[in-house]
Image (tube, rainbow, N blue to C red):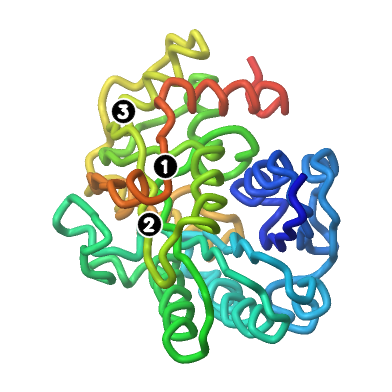
Amino acid sequence: MSDRTAFVTGATGFLGLHLVEQLRRRDWHVVALRRRTSDTRLLDRMGAEQVVGDVTDIDSLRRGIPVGCDAVFHAAALTSIWKKQADEQEAVNVGGTRNVIRAALDNGVGRVLHTSTWNVFDWSGGEITEDTPKGGDTAWIGYNRTKLAAEEAVLDAVGSQGLDAVILNPSHIIGRYDRHNWARLISMAAMGRLPGVPPGAGDFAHGPAVAAAHVAAFEKGGRGRNYLLGGPHARFLDLVRLIARHARQEKVPKRTVPPFLLKAMGHFEEKLAAITGWTPEVTPEAAEMVSRRVTIVSTRARDELGYAPTPLDEAVEDAYVFLMREKLITS
């Protein structure tokens, strides 16, 4: 029986739920941060203590983080790829991370496990390792920029304030509990409603494997080190075909949308959103991200954390079954 205590931010989100699940399976006492308006249906089943607060409210963090707790898993983030939400993204991703750092130091937390992203690295070489320079030609994208600034805040606190922290950089994550990110593409592909497929390719990590790597990083991760968490590499077109096979769906796009057309769609939808108030399906930033082909090297995570990526077929099946159960895929 473990006597360890963890505080988890973003606990009702996709990765946060997996973190809570993995920690509870290891008999950790988990204190899960949630907003007053959060949907807690899935979290309620996991046996975590819930506290109401927000990473943008440092007082709620100081109240919520148990004094002297073993670990803070900071997974809360605004993943929007729409510049209209830039101010909120700055407040959550950068300001929220600074608040978590300050509250963790004030409350004597043992270690902070910070969830970052592969997007903080320079993509231009087509392959990313932990030695790849950060920033690059996609730093203009709000999500990438704010997540990099959050990382820099963590590393600054490690160097100047004595914070013990490890940074995890997952690739595209798929699996159960996802309702928003890749879940939309999976649902549309499964129902034969996908109008086109982005031309890019990337690594796909499974939610449970990513969460397990975070827990392993508490024990084994090097202070101030980054760990890239990749997975099976696939073209988005091949991912869509795999989803269709699971769904027995015959309506499958045969080719990808050219990058120039996808980007034009992004600019058009952004202008339309400014008139209608709707959230755009595609933005120029999103078009840029899904038009690239990037491979992620996870050697460090494999060697130091025992990270074991899940086969893509298994991860897709997990996501598909969840979306069916939640009635987010219909006939």
Mark 3 sits on what residue? 237
Dot 1 crowding, Cα within 10 Å, few <14, some 14–19, many 20+: many
Q: For mark 2, what is the residue? A: 227
Quadrant containing the N terminus is top right
Give the CA separation, mark 3 to mark 2.
27 Å
Q: Mark 1 and mark 2 in contact (Cβ < 8 Å)?
A: yes
- Looking at the rendered image, the quarter that the C terminus falls into is top right
Three-letter code, disc 3: Leu
The image shows residue 38, relative to residue 244, as above or below, that is below
Residue under numbered circle 1: 307
Three-letter amino acid code of the residue under disc 2? Tyr
Asked if labels 2 and 3 touch by Cβ distance under 8 angstroms, the answer is no
Q: Is residue 270 visible?
A: no
Q: Is residue 16 left or right of residue 314?
A: right
Cα gap from disc 1 to disc 3, whole angstroms: 26 Å
Q: Earlier in the sequence, mark 3 or mark 2?
A: 2
Q: Residue furthest left?
A: 125
Q: Position of residue 188 (x, y in %)?
A: 52, 28
User: Disc 2 or 1, which lies upstream in sequence?
Assistant: 2
Picture quadrant where residue 322 is located:
top right
